[in-house]
Image (spheres, grey):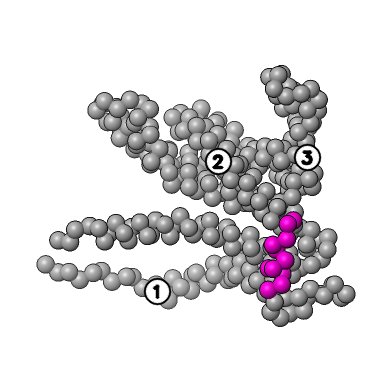
Amino acid sequence: MSTDLPRPRRMSLGSAFSMTPTWVVVVALFVIPVLFLVSASVATFDYDTGRLSWGFTLENYANLFRSATIVAFGNSLLLSVTATVACLLIGYPIAYAISLTRGVVQNLLLLAVIVPFWTAFVVRVYAWLTLLGPGDLVPSILTATGLFPAGLDLNFTPFAVFIGIVYCYLPLAILPIYAVLEQRDRALTDAAQDLGYSPARAFFRITLPMSLPGVGVAALLVGVPSLGEYTIPAVLGGGMTLMVGNLITNAFSVTGNYAAGSAIAVLLLASIVIVYLVPRLVRLVRTAIGSRKEPRR
């Protein structure tokens, strides 16, 4: 019996040439800007001339440990995590319900999820200012419960920023979860129920594990952009809720300190990369440990 492993296929010259436009776009729009950002983060900003003095210094990164920067990263991390969890908890039942429908009903439900994207992002954020003020819809509902005082004003609060992030990013959580649930083999759930599983047990033992890849994608699509969100805290937070996006904007447009702004942006980018890579590294380690524990034949 032959034990030769199949050799990996080599990319032909024609295939490599056809990928050239793609690599040009990637290098021009992603690699070069990131390299410039990293270079600017280790440069020195001259306050007299308002220009960068190219060189190498870690002073910009040392200044990141100021209280304002730490508070901004803490607020961003807290709001990003809580908003991501909220989007998953709200979006999963919606995606599951849509996957159970068929035909026109399913198309209408998907259209209802996608329609908000047809409106400008800033317009949707500003619309919440008319819903969170004193006497508006949300405060009126909360006041009616008797748990909150009359004249409640939720504008320019962390809660308003949280509501804005959940509202704006909820479709990004629903769609990938729906895509995975729609492709699942429903015969497995039916077979489990025929063997005595209750609908709830069949869901938690079969449907939920099969949908976890969609949940992971949804968490990335919501958590990563919300971590550096600027528009929502600027509008609904009124500058009262400091986040990383506000710091970067202030550094570039207000003080003009491109070196400090670049350092904050690089730290944010590094944080996102770490969040993206850690689960994959853990999975690789578990796979390696599991392969070592398998008995040799």
Q: How many marks?
A: 3
Residue 129: x and y in percent read 78, 35
Q: Secondary structure at mark 2?
A: helix
- Using the image as rendered, state which of residue 17 and residue 110 is in the foreground: 110
Rendered image: mark on residue 12:
1
Which mark, by number, is residue 85? 2
In depth, the one of 146 and 175 nearer the eye is 146
Q: Which residues are magenta?
A: 58-68
Amino acid type of disc 2? Val
Left or right? Give the position of 107 relative to 120.
Answer: left
Q: Nearer the viewer, mark 3 or mark 1?
A: 3
Q: Are marks 3 and 2 in contact (CB under 8 Å)?
A: no
Residue depicted at x 36% and y 26%: 199
Q: Nearer the viewer, mark 1 or mark 2?
A: 2
Question: Which labelled disc corresponds to residue 156?
Answer: 3
User: Helix, strand, or loop for circle 1?
Assistant: loop
Residue, x 78% and y 28% (percent of image)?
152
Distance CA(mark 1)–CA(mark 2): 45 Å
Q: Label 1 crowding class (10 Å Cα cut-off): few <14, some 14-19, many 20+? A: few
Q: Position of residue 227 (x, y in %)?
A: 63, 51
Mark toward the start of the polypeptide (3 vs 2): 2
Residue 238 percent coordinates (x, y): 80, 44
Q: Quadrant of residue 128?
A: top right
